[in-house]
Image (spheres, coloured by chain):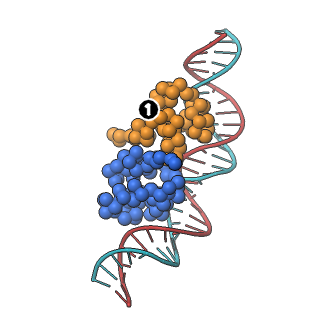
Chain colours: A blue, B orange, C cyan, D red
Amino acid sequence: MAKNLKLKAARAEKDMTQGDLAAAVGVSRQTINMIEKGEYNPTIRLCRAICKTLGKTLDELFWEEEP
Amino acid sequence: MAKNLKLKAARAEKDMTQGDLAAAVGVSRQTINMIEKGEYNPTIRLCRAICKTLGKTLDELFWEEEP
DNA sequence: AAAATAAGTATAATATACTTGACATAATGA
DNA sequence: TCATTATGTCAAGTATATTATACTTATTTT
């Protein structure tokens, strides 16, 4: 899994810290950190919550093209 | 969580059974069954695999508007 | 009609998403 | 420079996604 730079950018666009986003969607700061680092595999429910908080869609933040 | 009828329809469109789809994405048949029933919360990796198998995007199959 | 095949359901076990708490480092500002 | 804030990382625990097995109820097909 690659880094999720789209998420990082969308968060920056809203001027939110990892902690802010974590609080907004109800998970821990580490969870957001690891998602951005691409080290794992969140649930669709969490992805939806992140998208709604950041005003993006699933395709915009969580779709990836493979090599 | 509501039933995922969009998934059911996309699967029907490809003439695949729940078992076929499960085998194609590498999970058990019950997992597909429960996702369609809306009884849980798959991981984004699994959602992506399902989308690619069925030729749909995340937004098409896994976005939901809330009440 | 029966015999397949597909879908739905349940339970117990395993894998892994996610937490808590803590510490280290990079960046920002006073 | 010092203090503060944001990010990155680790280990150990908890919650839950997913599995294996098995049984039941539709739905097709012969």
Pointer 1 chain: B
Rendered-image quadrant of the C terminus of chain B? top left
Secondary structure beneath label 1: helix
Q: Amino acid at mark 1?
A: Lys
Residue D28, image x, y percentages: 57, 16
**Picture residue at 50% right of the left edge, 38% below the top:** B52
Asked whether residue B3 appears in the rendered view, the answer is: no
Q: Give the camera-side residue of C2 and B32.
A: B32
Q: Position of residue A37 (x, y in %)?
A: 48, 60
Residue D24, by quadrant, is: top right
Compared to residue B42, the image places residue B36 above or below, namely above
Q: Camera-side residue: A5 or B29?
A: A5
B35 lies above or below A61:
above
Counting from the top left corner in percent of width and height, residue D1 is at: 38, 90
Which residue is painted at 59% across and 31% down in the image? B20
Which corner quadrant holds the N terminus of chain B? Answer: top left
Q: Does D5 appear above or below A16?
A: below
Q: Which residue is mark 1?
A: B6
Residue in view at x 42 percent, y 57 percent:
A5
Q: Is residue C27 left or right of residue D15?
A: left
